[in-house]
Image: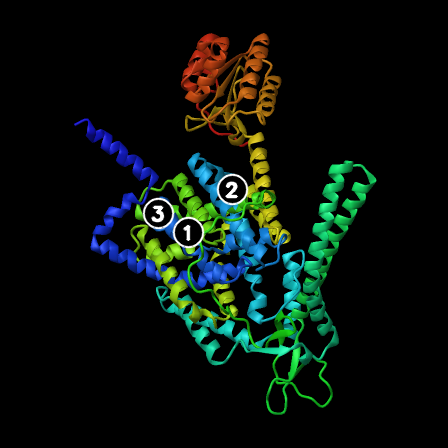
Amino acid sequence: MASVPSRALTNGRLRLLFPFLNWMGELRDGKILRADIIAGITVALVLVPQSMAYAQLAGLPAYYGLYAAFLPPMVAALFGSSRQLATGPVAVVSLLTAAALEPIAASGSPGYVAYAITLSLIVGLFQLGLGLLRLGVVVNFLSHPVIIGFTNAAAIIIATSQLDKIFGVRADKAEHHYETVWNTVAAVPTQLHWPTFFIAVGAFAIMILLRRLNPRIPNVLIAVAITTTLSWLIHFEHLETVELSQIGNKSVQEVVRDELTLKREIPELDKAIADAEKTYQEAHKQFGTDDSRTLLAQHLFDTLKLKRERRIKTVKADIEEIKKTRFDHVPQPDGATGKFYLHGHLPEGTESDGRLWRIRSVDGEKLVMNGGGNVVANVPKGLPTLALPKFDVNVILQLLSAGITISLIGFMEAISIAKAMATRTRQKLDANQELVGQGIGNIVGSLSLSYPTSGSFSRSAVNIGAGAITGFSSVVTSVIVVVTLLWLTPLLYHLPQATLAAVIMMAVVGLINVKAIKHAWLVQRQDGIVAVVSFLLTLAFAPHLDKGILIGAGLALIMYLYRTMQPRIAVLARHADGTLRDAEMFGLKPCENIAVIRFDGSLYFANTSYFEDRVQERIASKPDLKYVIVIGEGINQIDATGEEMLSHLAERLDKAGIQLLFTGLKKQVLDVFMRTGLYEKVGSERFFRTEDQALDHVWKMLGNNHEADCPLNIVCPVMSPK
């Protein structure tokens, strides 16, 4: 019989380590299994196009969204506590990823991708650490006003970041997001690509109409399917591979040839740098650090490295510049590909084909010209290879602050969704276990080329709305993504990027919630100020979103300290209804010998002086004062500064012939007094359970039938306040 408790204990530990054991047995019920399969397929129909759109928002090739939708949803569901939370790429985390990586690498470059994968690992490790240490409470440092201000600003930033894809224009990226938006809008009159714009409008129309017709219809998938088919039918992309000689502009030809020269120079420069480094190392070993020969060798080594970096940077900047340039194409008389001239600079007597062309890529003296819109293009077939991210301490340190920010913001989004669903399903939710699930999901995701992920509000709503009962629905979703990566990627080639931009903009519309900011203002004006300031600063600092969040969080803490530094301290008197009320507010007559003071707040270092000053004011205004009764029902906590102040205050009042009494103190406060000896020092006879007990004691001590005439005992009509 002794083995039964042991087996139960082991089973309990297993369920803590593997939370999916709590619901795995329920899948024996055919109804539950069928409901989860249907829900998983339904979520996948939304996830596949959404994930590709969010990957582009993060500055990554679209197919990396599928990698992020591969393992994280399944792993987070298996190790989290929420049964219906749908994990994967989300808009806000994608935006934060782009904001963290764009200052240190070019979007879509191999370095950028590597940093994104490393960032996923950092986010996962931080979330896992918080969960294992039971520190889920840390997310409370990001107050609700900060989050609603940030979320509203992020929604606007996300939506406006897609304008270039909606209109088919290319604009210079500026230091601030609002400048980039202005550059994009300014480029529209001259660069607007009408087919791209019409594709985007069509995608919007399909999604809006279907959502209004029936929210259960997979409007995103249908919009993607229709616009992709249309893109294929009308040859929306329209690519042509041409020779460099077919570009009728010498400056463009020089830039391309300069890149070819650079490719030949790089190996020579690398060899020269390696030789210079070897010479420097030998000189340093032989002559020491400060010898002139060592310094000369170091100078040569540094000069060569700087030359290489400058050459690469200059050529890359020039190539990027010509990629923004628009060209007119003059076909040959037989309709074959002819020459390309700068837009608006056609030779006299020639006519263009009516398209605006741009350089898509450069490969030697071969140029791929794009005369249509942008599509997703080739999506690598097959599953991502599992491998550890490359560890670089400098990169990890550089990304650490962004990783922590993404961890907290992403988890706050996930846990708020999970709580809402747990309330609806009446299932138990463990925030720390959810941190573990999200953390393991991001860690495993980093092994399969995923960028940071989190719980999605829209897909979680689809999941629970489709009837999901257990986390198995997310496992089914991951399986559908696997099927897509293995066999369906060719169907995604012609998917217009304008459609993905429309998907993103439709998804973030729900994040804009002005009512939440207004509500925060009504609840507490300081909270409203924090929400507005967080909103404005996030917009102003974008793409450096962490600055807006950090300043908003700091302001929220300052506002909290400001509120608690001067809590409400009321001098009480007897009200007409027989209760003790604020004498000043209700115009009540106080007693000349007894002051009853109520302190509404925890007593700590920031407000002890304020409390002491108010008591001193009361003493100074009442020369016949004999007793001060502190009603401590509102004191939840007291720190060392507060305890020290009360000790000194009691001493000073005793010397002045005034006794300090306490009523209604909570156990945690009395425990502090007991531990420090203040309870014995003041005297146990000065502590009472209720104010009435304290008043009875004081009236007896005052004698002369003071109770009969004391305003604190006689119910008088309320006077108007002075």
**Which is closer to the viewer, label 1 or label 2?**
1
- Identify the disc placed on residue 72: 1
Q: State the CA–CA distance, disc 1 to disc 2.
A: 27 Å
Instruction: State the residue lying farthest toward the bottom.
Output: 333
- Label 2, label 3: how far apart the Cα atoms are: 29 Å
Within-10-Å neighbours for mark 2: few <14, some 14–19, many 20+: some
Quadrant for the C terminus in the image: top right
Q: Residue at x 60, y 40 (%)?
A: 555
Residue type of the residue flagged with mark 1? Pro
Q: Residues within 10 Å of mark 3 (few under 14, many from 20)?
A: many
Residue 143: numbered disc: 2
**267 relative position to 422: left or right:** right
- Can you say whether 703 is above or below 411 in the image? above
Extreme residue in the right direction: 292
Which amino acid type is marked by label 2? Answer: Ser
Q: Which mark is residue 78?
A: 3
Q: Quadrant of residue 381?
A: bottom left
Q: Position of residue 355 (x, y in %)?
A: 61, 81
Indicate which disc, 2 or 3, sits on the residue closer to the N terminus: 3
Structural distance between the alpha carbons of marks 1 and 3:
10 Å
Q: Secondary structure at mark 2?
A: loop
